[in-house]
Image: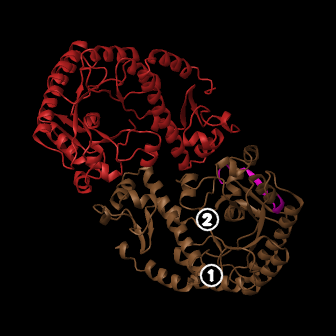
Chain colours: A brown, B red
Amino acid sequence: MPIGTQGSVKAIEPRELVEIGAQIILGNTYHLYLRPGMDVMEAAGGLHRFAGWKKPLLTDSGGYQVFSLTDLRTIEEEGVTFRSHLDGSEHLFTPESVVRMQRQLGSDIMMVFDECAPFPCDVAYAQRSNAMTVRWAARCREEFTRTTHLYGYTQTLFGIVQGSVYKEIREQSVRDLVAMDFDGYALGGLAVGESDEVMYEITDFCEAMLPATKPRYLMGVGKPENLLESIARGMDMFDCVLPTRNGRNAALFTRTGELNMRNLSTKFDFSPVDPECSCYTCKNFSRGYLRHLFQVKEILGLQLATIHNLFFYLQLMREARQAILEQRFQSWKNATLEQLQSKVVAS
Amino acid sequence: MPIGTQGSVKAIEPRELVEIGAQIILGNTYHLYLRPGMDVMEAAGGLHRFAGWKKPLLTDSGGYQVFSLTDLRTIEEEGVTFRSHLDGSEHLFTPESVVRMQRQLGSDIMMVFDECAPFPCDVAYAQRSNAMTVRWAARCREEFTRTTHLYGYTQTLFGIVQGSVYKEIREQSVRDLVAMDFDGYALGGLAVGESDEVMYEITDFCEAMLPATKPRYLMGVGKPENLLESIARGMDMFDCVLPTRNGRNAALFTRTGELNMRNLSTKFDFSPVDPECSCYTCKNFSRGYLRHLFQVKEILGLQLATIHNLFFYLQLMREARQAILEQRFQSWKNATLEQLQSKVVAS
């Protein structure tokens, strides 16, 4: 899922997201609450209409952003009081207010308000934090039932499994959330600094307990190889800023590794970024041209890199789906991982 | 003609330029000489192939840029020695080298190397400056004849009329250039600080002496009303950074005046930028959304504003052409000017 934090996936137009096959994008409750504000969102008829996005939308609850304001927030049972990173003004987010804001945003998938525990954190903190996250999940679930959609289409609510790297807490979290019967389940608190091995182990552990009929969303992941390994472990949905952020930093993904367009080696290289790619960028422009655009700081460089990197990720996911349907995922995954790590073009 | 100084029209893709009906764009010899360099341009097969632009290209000679480096350049009969604005390195542009570089760029329309005299400038300076510009035009004309195109298609060369606000010098300039038989004639040294009235007077004066069968290009102009008044005076081609630069500054053109998207009045305004406009931006997004994008500094704001403003200019030119063909230009112009100045939306 491409990330559109502030109501726009950076440097790409909605029609281009459709063109490259994006089925769903993200918005962020914290950022949209601060600007343009929920009054504007509701007056506009929700984020879909405001941003001209007709396909599904998922909204983060804002928990991750609020908790990352380490020096600016106070956590209490009621919710989190925080100061805006923009003007220092004071605000309170509660599980209930976060659900109501996502009603105003009109997202197709709403997320519960959770604490994403820092890494590393000791078992006592993880225990306390998850217990509160579970109580907040229950309050979100209740508010979700108590309220209704505002714009004529139904919305869904996902729970978020926490518990840091502690299996006993993860197990409790999964049990408690599954009992609340959410529309889908996310794994939170991963890809926050732990090793890939630990991330895969926790993913495996939680997956085994999640209902097979509900979507599983691994939050904040990740590199192409992380996605393939996580799909192998039963994950269905991902969000990550890597394709867009790296693209704006001139790092382009290819099937044989990442290629930085600022490399001098691309100066006289008039071949496409990835000869195997069929995106607008690769079909019409060269590495040498992209290098020039980044060197002279032309906005078009950001646009073309974003188109390519998102296409790359979405194409990888399309191929994974097809391989699953054709029952050849494992061999496709192994071959693709080997290719991704060959780094032929990254010389 | 949208301006693509460094080989890219800022914040818009080539396919979008085609979509909004751009028939020709500009590149700049000075900027492309410094970055990526003429070795890259020739290795790429010219600017068309480098930038993925299949329609006509016009290249500025770089004279305007070189002369604006006031403290960094020395003018002599041979040419101009200047220091790069990027790293202070020393370079020499001559009429001959400027033609040869435009051969390397492969532009469909090349411009002679001229001095755009500052405004105001006294008659003695204007006289001397234009005399040299005419001698340089002859040297460009000669180099153009002596050399040939590099990429399998022919190129053309335009002369540039100078002479500041002095009719006797302008007259001499036109006579000398017309005698050299260029493919088209540009009026330079206008829109540099003089009043609109003076600009129109000089345009009128020069136009009467220019051959009716060759295109006339009024350089660096201008606002929508300037374009209409100049078309009325027989001008055919224009280039200006206004639509792109103003767009990136949140100023959007509409048929009833300019509208700044940062105005608080647009916060809850979910109508299109210009209800009469059929561009991608106006068909899909609102003033309120554009305001938000500019407020949170999203790149998409620059993209959507650029698409709209360039579409606005090109649409105005399409309507002007149609009105000329249907012999109703004068009445169309008067009605359009009145509408442009009503500023209903700029409240």
The x and y percentages for residue B55 are 34, 43
Chain for disc number 1: A
Q: Residue at x 50, y 85 (%)?
A: A334
- Inspect the image, locate mark 2, and give the three-letter code of the amino acid beneath it: Met
Label disc, if present, on residue B89 of the rendered structure: none
Q: Can you tell which quarter of the image residue B229 is in?
A: top left
Q: Nearer the viewer, residue A284 or B69?
A: A284
Q: Residue at x 47, y 83 (%)?
A: A335
Q: Residue at x 60, y 61 (%)?
A: A3
Q: Secondary structure at mark 2?
A: loop
What segment carries the magenta color?
A85-96
With B318 as the anchor, is A204 left or right in this view? right
Q: Nearer the viewer, residue A54 or B8?
A: A54
Mark 2, other Cα within 10 Å: few <14 / some 14–19 / many ≥20: some
Mark 1, other Cα within 10 Å: few <14 / some 14–19 / many ≥20: many
Q: Please say if A65 is above or below B129.
A: below
Q: Please say if A140 is above or below B65.
A: below
Q: Would you say the residues marked 1 and 2 are in contact, meaning their CB atoms lie under 8 Å apart?
A: no
User: Disc 1 designates what residue?
Assistant: A199
Q: Can you tell which quarter of the image residue A199 is in?
A: bottom right
Mark 1 or mark 2, which has the lower sequence index? 2
Q: Nearer the viewer, residue A159 or A235?
A: A235
Q: Please say if B101 is above or below A202.
A: above
User: Is circle 1 on the same chain as circle 2?
Assistant: yes
Q: CA distance from mark 1 to mark 2?
A: 20 Å
The x and y percentages for residue A243 are 52, 65
The x and y percentages for residue B239 are 37, 32
Q: Please say if A121 is above or below A26.
A: below
Q: Nearer the viewer, residue B102 or A160?
A: B102
User: Disc 2 designates what residue?
Assistant: A1
Q: Is residue B58 visible?
A: yes
Q: Is residue B87 visible?
A: no
